[in-house]
Amino acid sequence: MEDDKDIKVMVEKRRVTYPRVDNDENAMKIINAEIMITKETEIKIKFTYPLSHTVTLEFKNPNGFNQKDFFLAVQQGYRQIYKEEDDVVGDPGTITPHMLNRARSKGPHGIWGHYIGDLFLEGYEEESPGIFSLSMGS
C-alpha cells in the first residue's frame, strides 16, 4: 500500500498513482495536477473493480480534464456506486469477523472485497477518445 505522501505521476505512459479515492484532501496532493489528460469536455469512465458488473458513468467539464479533474471524477463515481449499493442492500459486513475485507453484496453492482476507503487509482487508459478504463489498487 502506498503512502499518501508518495504520489507518483508518469504521464507519458498514462500510468498514474493517486492517493485513496475516499479522501477529499488527496486531490490537492496530486503532483502535476494541471497536466491535461484530455481536452474532451464529456468523458465516460468504466468502473470495474471491485464490482461484479462494469459501471460506465459520464462526466462533464467545460475545460476538459486535467489530472485533478479526472481524479475528482473517479472519486465522484466511486462514491455514487457505493452509495447506490448501500442504499439498496446496506453494508454486508466483512467476510469473517477477523478480516477487514468487505463481503460480496447482492446489490446492483455486486461490490466485493473492499470498502471505498481501501481503493487507490493506480492508472488509467484512454481506450478511445473520451472513454477511459481504470486500474485500481487496494
Image: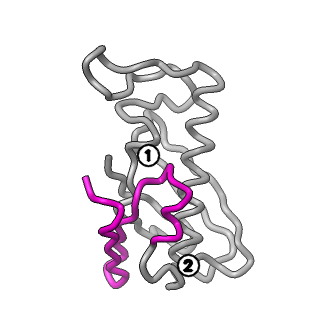
Q: Is residue 75 magenta?
A: no
- Residue 87, position as x, y percentages in the image: 65, 25
Name which residue type carries label 1. Answer: Thr
Q: Is residue 95 left or right of residue 24?
A: left
**For residue 118, side relative to residue 110 (left or right):** left
User: Does 75 appear above or below 82?
Assistant: below
Q: Which residues are magenta?
A: 1-29
In front here: 92 or 107? Answer: 92
Instruction: Tell me what residue is drawn at x 69 percent, y 75 percent.
Output: 41
**Residue 93 vertical placement versus 114 (above, below):** above
Q: Position of residue 48 (x, y in %)?
A: 44, 46
- Image mark for residue 66: 2
> Based on the displayed image, in which of its 4 quarters is residue 133 positioned?
bottom left
Q: Which residue is mark 1?
A: 48
Point 48% across, 36% down: residue: 53
Judge by depth and name the residue closer to the eye, 76 or 20: 20
Q: Is residue 95 left or right of residue 81?
A: left
